[in-house]
Image: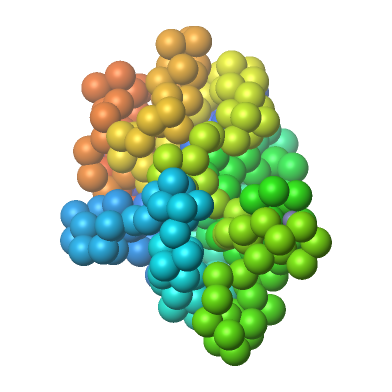
Amino acid sequence: MHTDRGVAALAQLIAESERAVVFTGAGISTESGIPDFRSPGGVWTKMAPIDFESFLASEAARRETWRRRFAMEEMFRDAEPNRGHRAVEALVRRGKVSAVITQNIDGLHQASGIPPEKVIELHGNTTFATCLDCGHRYEIDALRIQFEADGAAPRCIRCKGWVKTATISFGQSMPEEAMRRAQTETLSADLCIVLGSSLVVYPAAGFPELAKRNGATLAIVNREETGLDRFADLVLHEGIGDILGGAVGVN
Ligand SMILES: [Zn+2]
């Protein structure tokens, strides 16, 4: 569909909705300079991610996990919300969107001004770390200074547990409360807007599918084809910032 008609069609669906939910993936953050690790040619095709079992089992794996994370710190720290994030924030602020369910770990939805309680992070958040045993929070900068001084994977000062970014690694169980909230929001929505996800990573990608099966309208904006294109009411293979920014009236 031509861009102008796509913008108008999406604007129409948003106008008709009384309670929408937004589901976002890596594609919304690539416009902020954060790469899609899963994409062809992405980081994970060159360097396999370290799974949760290895992190727990091996000091070498923990060190390598942290070495990689610190190497990406400038990128995460400097990334700013883009037009797509700002358009989503406007929809939340106007009361049109009740929640943003995201596969992203970059915290950019919160940085755009959306109240944290309205952002449901299915894969956690990499902008801070927690102790795996007691949950105590740690800031990345402080961990980095310590790591550069002694080269050891960080341990909790309270309980000696392993400290890890607050993300969900491969092999780590999905966060129960986030999954439950995502399901509740999905089942309450009459419109689900997917932004920048190829909808192939389950169980996360199951939410747009659930919305559609529950009778909601499904709109997808993603550069590439997705696993749910044939079920969707509107599919736009274009950039998120231009399409959603245009539909919402945000620059
Ligand atoms: Zn602890």
Residue at the extreme right of the image, as rendered: 158
- Where is residue 118 drawn, in percent x and y? 70, 41
Q: Quadrant of residue 112?
A: bottom right
**Colouring style:** rainbow
Q: Quadrant of residue 44?
A: bottom left
| Residue drawn at x 44%, y 46% as measured from the top left | 53
Q: Is residue 89 left or right of residue 29?
A: right
Count of all numbered marks drawn on residues in the image: 0
| Residue drawn at x 41%, y 20% as measured from the top left | 209
Q: Is residue 197 left or right of residue 141?
A: left
Q: Nearer the viewer, residue 222 or 147?
A: 147
Q: Is residue 247 visible?
A: no
Q: Is residue 169 left or right of residue 27?
A: right
Residue at the extreme bottom of the image, as rendered: 149
Q: Quadrant of residue 45?
A: bottom left
Q: Is residue 135 visible?
A: yes
| Ligand 1 sits in quadrant | bottom right
- Where is residue 183 drawn, in percent x and y? 58, 22
- Where is residue 172 drawn, in percent x and y? 49, 40
| Residue drawn at x 24%, y 22% as measured from the top left | 230
| Residue drawn at x 74%, y 42% as measured from the top left | 117
Image quarter where the N terminus lies is top left
Q: Nearer the viewer, residue 75 or 148?
A: 148
- Where is residue 83 drawn, in percent x and y? 50, 60
**Eyeballing the image, is 42 above or below 243?**
below
Q: Is residue 40 left or right of residue 15?
A: left
Q: Nearer the viewer, residue 187 or 71?
A: 71
**Eyeballing the image, is 231 above or below 60?**
above
**Eyeballing the image, is 250 above or below 203?**
below
